[in-house]
Amino acid sequence: MKSAFLFSPVDTVNKSLSGADIIHVSCLPYLCGKALPAKAPSGPKLLLSFPFISKGRAYSLFCSRFAEFAACFDGFTLQNIGDDVTLKELFDADPALRREDYFIAGDNAFNIANKTSAGFWRGRLDSVVVSPELTPEEQKELANGFPEGLLPEVIASGPVIVMRSEHCYAAEGPSYNCGKCGKFGLGGGSLFDISGGELPVVTNPVDCNSVLLAKAEKFTCFDSDSIIVRNG
C-alpha cells in the first residue's frame, strides 16, 4: 500500500498521487476558506489531518467544523497523542457519526519505536507511523512485527516534521498576521541549517505558528500489502 502527506494545498487528483491508496491532507487550507472536496465513491482514502499544534483558534475551528469535515473525508490523521481524546469526544458528541465508518491514522509524533508502543494503539487507530528516527532496518523489523489490526506506515521518502513552534519562522519581524504565507497559508519558504540543508517551513496563518520539515532518508526495502509506504 502507498500513501502521501500533503502539507501544501495542492490538488489531490494530481497525477503524481494517482497510485496512492491513502492521502493525508492538511486541514489548514480549509480552515482558511478553501472549498471542501466532494467525497468520491472510489479512489484513494482522503484523511484530513488535525492541526499540527493541539491548541489555539485553528484547533477550535477544526473541532467546531468536525461534522462538516466528516462528510467530505474518509477519515482523519492525528498529529499528536492528545488528538485521540479529542477525536473520541467529537464522535461521542454527534450520534450521527460512527467511529467505525472512518479510517483513523496516527502520524510520526506518536513516536512508535517498539512493539509495546505499537500495541498500545491497537483498536484505537487503524494505522500509525513507525518512527522515522529508527534506521531503515529497524523500521522494517518493527513494521513486520506490528499487532494484527494495526497497519504500520513507513515514511520511505518525503518530508517529516522535525520541529513544531508556537511562533512563525516565516513572519516578517515580531508582528503576527503579516500575510506572507498567502490566502490559504502553508507557504512559509525555507530555512537552511549550517551545512546548507533545506528545512521547509509550513505555516498556520490562523494562529501564526509553524513547523519545520526535513526530508526523510530515502529507502525502498518494503514490499508488502500489510505495510503502508509513504512517498511524499
Image: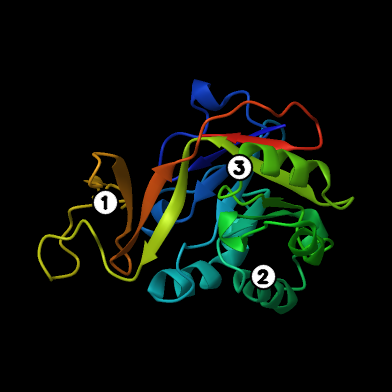
In space, the residues marked 2 and 1 are separated at their CA atoms by 29 Å
Residue wearing tag 2: 84
Query: Between tags 3 and 1, which lies in front?
Result: 3
Which SS class for mark 3? Answer: loop
In space, the residues marked 2 and 3 are separated at their CA atoms by 27 Å
Residue 115 x, y percent position in the rendering? 79, 57
Sequence-wise first label, 3 or 1 = 3
Judged left or right of residue 24, residue 14 is left
Q: Residue at x 40, y 63 (%)?
A: 164
Seen from the viewer's position, the closer of residues 114 and 25 is: 114
Judged left or right of residue 4, residue 211 is left
Please identify the residue farthest to the right as the structure is shown: 148
Q: Residue at x 40, y 44 (%)?
A: 214
Q: Residues within 10 Å of mark 1 (few under 14, many from 20)?
A: few
Residue wearing tag 3: 135
Q: Is residue 186 visible?
A: no
In space, the residues marked 3 and 1 are separated at their CA atoms by 38 Å
Residue wearing tag 1: 183
Sequence-wise first label, 2 or 3 = 2
What's under tag 2, amino acid-wise?
A: Asp
Q: Residues within 10 Å of mark 3 (few under 14, many from 20)?
A: few
Judged left or right of residue 223, residue 197 is left
Sequence-wise first label, 2 or 1 = 2
Which SS class for mark 2? Answer: helix
Q: Residues within 10 Å of mark 2 (few under 14, many from 20)?
A: some
Vertical position of residue 69 compared to residue 214: above or below:
below
Vertical position of residue 196 compared to residue 85: above or below:
above
Vertical position of residue 149 compared to residue 197: above or below:
below
What's under tag 3, amino acid-wise?
A: Thr
